[in-house]
Amino acid sequence: MFKTKALHRFRPVDRGKGEVVKGVNLVLYLNRFRVCSARSAKRIRAHEMAYDGLREFVSALEGAGELKRISAPVSAELEITHIVDRISKEGGPALLFENVKGTGVPLLINAFGSHRRMAMALGVDDVNEIGREIEELLHLPLPTGIVDKLKMIPTIARFAKFPPKNVSHGACQEKVMDVPSLSFLPILKCWPQDGGKFITLPMVFTKSLATGRRNCGMYRMHVYDERTTGMHWHIHHDGARHFREYKEAGKQMEVAVALGGDPAITYAATAPMPPEVDEMLFAGFLRKKPVEMVKCKTIDMEVPADAEVVLEGYVEPSEERVEGPFGDHTGYYSLSDDYPVFHIQCITHRSQPLYPATVVGKPPMEDCYMGKATERIFLPLIRTQIPELVDMNLPLFGVFHNYAFVSIDKRYPYQARKVMHAIWGLGQMMFTKIIVVVDRDVNVQDVEEVLWRVGNNVDPRRDIAIVDGPLDALDHASPLPRTGSKIGIDATKTWPEEGHTREWPDEIKMSREIIELVERRWSEYGFEK
Ligand SMILES: Cc1cc2nc3c(=O)[nH]c(=O)nc-3n(C[C@H](O)[C@H](O)[C@H](O)COP(=O)(O)O)c2cc1C
Ligand SMILES: [Mn+2]
């Protein structure tokens, strides 16, 4: 009945037994790394996964038949978008546009745009490997006494290899522009009604005024002129949180933007890390090698040394400008709104830079695969908060925040409700507009199966929870920006304790003996095996 979908590749990660550490905070969990049993130590990936910059990744893609070079001249206005859109919908390769009209800089796009390329970007065969590794680390026993704590030291030392490392030189600073100008880059105007050109794969670096801690988030940048862009950090994100500190203090805020580098670093900028956890630490963990950071030329900020291009500048505490509209990953234009403004005072770059970009639009596009990697990598961390969670599917068409299909090991009445509320209280999962909860044996990666269960198992009045709360800034249906309602659908088997006193029928299943008998006799009936 249920078709096999590409998503089937994402099978649930086997759940280990043992103690689950509380807290999604990566630093906490890195710091709590406990006694590492010899068995687990062996299973932790030991080889290096790091790419020495974006070019090495391009070579790897090319070697794997995952890259197409396009030498025909193309325009950065709309034309590239439509090519990439067609290629994305066909499940095609990464594209390297070598001749973008008006600039001498080649443009790399769709480099993350498949499950395979996403895995390659993180140096694994399958992103589930990273999920499993985190799962194992989380299930190492917690230290109980002083001896156990001492035993942890070698484990911590092992992770100490991965924090970012400051270096004095970086390829990203081979050239310093005399007069900074964005005009040398093939920046895209993505969709017809876009408010202008947008930098679409930027790693935006900021520091907290209060703690000095670094953040790196991916926030698209509307180009106003050669030296000025928008700074589209949504209010729920860490860049905006840092900005509020500067705004309250009435201080100018230094910001650096890096483009390119090891794709694991770019991915880390998109990952929903808890506040105050350095994405560069996470990138180091992913690539099994510290991220090398180099100090900016004009501001007190460090950026990945292997980046292609770095923009250095500042954001004024009270300046705002209209940002957008922008054809967004929801498949709709996100409405224009007032956002802070980024002033570029210095640009450094490699001597022959490569410009990384993406186009978002109606799914599936490149960002969907980044989202899917996040789903797999963060599942074990989410389980530390929601231990009954068996599997989770954030379907591509759900654009990260519209839908979550989750299966749970239900052990008490109303547990599905508890899970919904836990999801709505969990970091960026709080934006999930529609949550469907099913029992543990349901394959949430099969959307048809989920909808089949919903149809059969739900009594709408009883099984639906509607709550008010924060929503993603991109939600255009909510009555107020960033605020509206969310729905949870409990499609688990309803128990008598939940008010269902009628009998609940069993699902139809054939007995094992008959299945085996028919299997044995299949060719005898005249069917092909
Ligand atoms: C291609 C792409 C574009 C994105 N654009 C934005 C954006 O313009 N503004 C924003 O706030 N988040 C954007 N995001 C999401 C954030 O990067 C993501 O939520 C990240 O976890 C934020 O990091 P932070 O929690 O450190 O702020 C984008 C993500 C991707 C993959
Ligand atoms: Mn962050």
Image (cartoon, grey):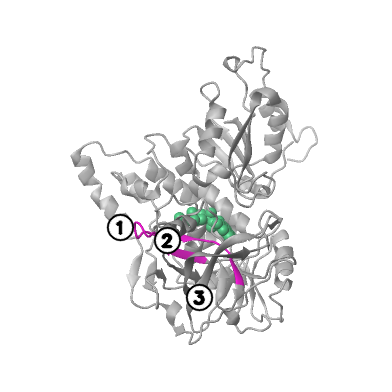
| Circle 1: residue type | Ala
Q: Which mark is residue 504?
A: none
- Sequence-first disc among 1 and 3: 1
- Residue 261 in percent (x, y) is at 48, 70
- Residue 510 in percent (x, y) is at 69, 24
In this picture, residue 186 sits left or right of residue 344: right
Indicate if the residue with disc 2 has its beta carbon within 8 Å of ligand 1. no
Identify residue for label 1: 160
Mark in the foreground, 3 or 2: 2
Q: Judging from the image, what secondary structure is the residue with disc 1 in?
A: loop
Q: Where, quadrant-wise, is the C terminus in this rendering?
A: top right
- Sequence-first disc among 3 and 2: 2
Identify residue for label 3: 344
Q: Relative to 451, say whether 307 is above or below.
A: below
Mark 2 is surrounded, within 10 Å at the Cα level, by few (under 14), some (14 to 19) or many (20 or more) other residues, namely many
Q: Judging from the image, what secondary structure is the residue with disc 3 in?
A: strand
Residue 261 visible in the snapshot: no
Asked if residue 187 is among those painted magenta in the image, a careful observer would answer no
Asked if residue 214 is among those painted magenta in the image, a careful observer would answer yes
What residue is shown at x 73% (from left), y 31% (from top)?
Answer: 521
Question: Is residue 90 or residue 253 the one in the foreground?
Answer: 253
Q: What span is in magenta?
A: 203-223
| Circle 2: residue type | Tyr
In this picture, residue 154 sits left or right of residue 25: left
Q: Relative to 252, say whether 211 is above or below.
A: above
In this picture, residue 241 sits left or right of residue 99: left
Q: Judging from the image, what secondary structure is the residue with disc 2 in?
A: helix
Mark 1 is surrounded, within 10 Å at the Cα level, by few (under 14), some (14 to 19) or many (20 or more) other residues, namely some
Q: Are marks 2 and 1 in contact (CB under 8 Å)?
A: no
Identify residue for label 2: 246
